[in-house]
Image (cartoon, grey):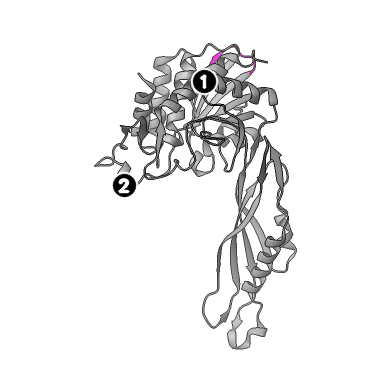
Amino acid sequence: MSLADLTGDLVSIPSHEDETAAGDFIEEWLRRETDASVRRDDAGNVIARKGTDTETLALVGHHDVVEPAESQIEAGGNEYIVERRDGRLYGRGTADMKGALAAAMLAFRDADPDGELVFASFVGEEVGGIGARHAVDRGFDPEYAVVGEGSTNYSGSDVTDVAVAHKGRRGSSIVASGTPAHASEADAGENAIYRATAAVDRVRDLEVPSVDVAGDTLEGRLTVTEIEGGSAMNVVPARCAVTVDERTVPGERADLERVEALEGITWTVDQDLPPMHCEDEAFAESVLEAADDAQDGRPELVTKPHATDAGWLSQAGTECVIYGPSEPGEAHTDDESVSITVLERCRETYRRIAEEWPTAR
């Protein structure tokens, strides 16, 4: 089976609301095509291992996708539409990230590793890394990992780069509490919206950390994205809630806790997707060398602006890089697609690094 055909088979399987069928396909393929030890954990993650139990390198992806557009679903809803034209595959999940997953499956099958090679496909990446967190909590701890999220065309056209860091995302809520009163006697109450706006002013004044990685500056960001409060035109509001989107960087966080020093304010973290930074330069350079050998372009070490499952692995102690076929602007779109040539490039890079690390040091 060709890489394009395997990708097409994976993409055609709906895995937006339920990843079970896609996980079944991956598990059955691995059992049929490899002699690896294959298991399915309680969350639905598919994990396969082969080679000697020394240093472990993992090829990591996920088989869930975001909700498809109607144009991406076959009549009846039993399959997603997959089309091949102009050297690309079109369909929900081609770029994010069943194409990379298929490339990793074939590389895992074909590689003859010097150490232990692991293939892992997680569930729930699109909804906060549910599968990755489940695996990490139960001892999934490879020393090294290549995560197949998009890194193509970051440094230039027709080049697949190696991302050595990415931002995280912390979403939080600021809730201001006040005392209701009739608006004609406003001084009898405490206006929760006024308290909330004081908290927003404090957020705007906070210093946001930044870090220099691979020649880039990853800058954190704080953005107030939602506000809700009040019950009627003539009532002093007793409650006002504000949502803050924070893009985090490896290392320090913005000191959002400072808003709680204001009267009537509570601050709650609703989601915290960790950033990633590969601190093992030898590993990053080895992946870069394998990537360079697999393509005509000259890949570079780069950074990504958004969170992936690499953040959960990195937080647990795994040295991670990101290398995958998706290009900026492809994931989650109604005409999502991936280059077949770049898929083959990724397959070859995955195979090379699987065979050359750790002996490449």
Which of the two discs, 1 and 2, sits closer to the camera? 1
Q: Which residue is mark 2?
A: 70
Question: Taking the image as drawn, is residue 161 in sight?
Answer: yes
Q: Secondary structure at mark 1?
A: loop
Asked whether 192 or 245 is in front, the reply is 245
Q: Position of residue 343 (x, y in %)?
A: 44, 26
Q: Position of residue 76 (x, y in %)?
A: 24, 42
Q: Position of residue 306 (x, y in %)?
A: 57, 43
* Highlighted magenta segment, given as a residue range: 48-55
Q: Residues within 10 Å of mark 2 (few under 14, many from 20)?
A: few
Q: Residue at x 51, y 17 (%)?
A: 351
Question: Label 2 is placed on what type of residue?
Answer: Glu
Q: Residue at x 57, y 41 (%)?
A: 307
Q: Position of residue 172 (x, y in %)?
A: 61, 55
Q: Secondary structure at mark 2?
A: helix
Alpha carbons under labels 1 and 2: distance apart: 37 Å
Q: Which residue is mark 1?
A: 294
On whether residue 52 falls in the magenta region, the answer is: yes
Q: Report the side of 15 relative to 306 (left or right).
A: left
* 49, above or below 244, in the image: above
On whether residue 346 falls in the magenta region, the answer is: no
Asked whether 243 or 219 is in front, the reply is 219
Figure quadrant of residue 212: top right
Instruction: Specify the quadrant that holds the N terminus.
Output: top left
Q: Residues within 10 Å of mark 1 (few under 14, many from 20)?
A: many
Question: Label 1 is placed on what type of residue?
Answer: Ala
Q: Earlier in the sequence, mark 1 or mark 2?
A: 2
Q: Residue at x 62, y 43 (%)?
A: 167
Q: Report the side of 120 relative to 90 (left or right).
A: right
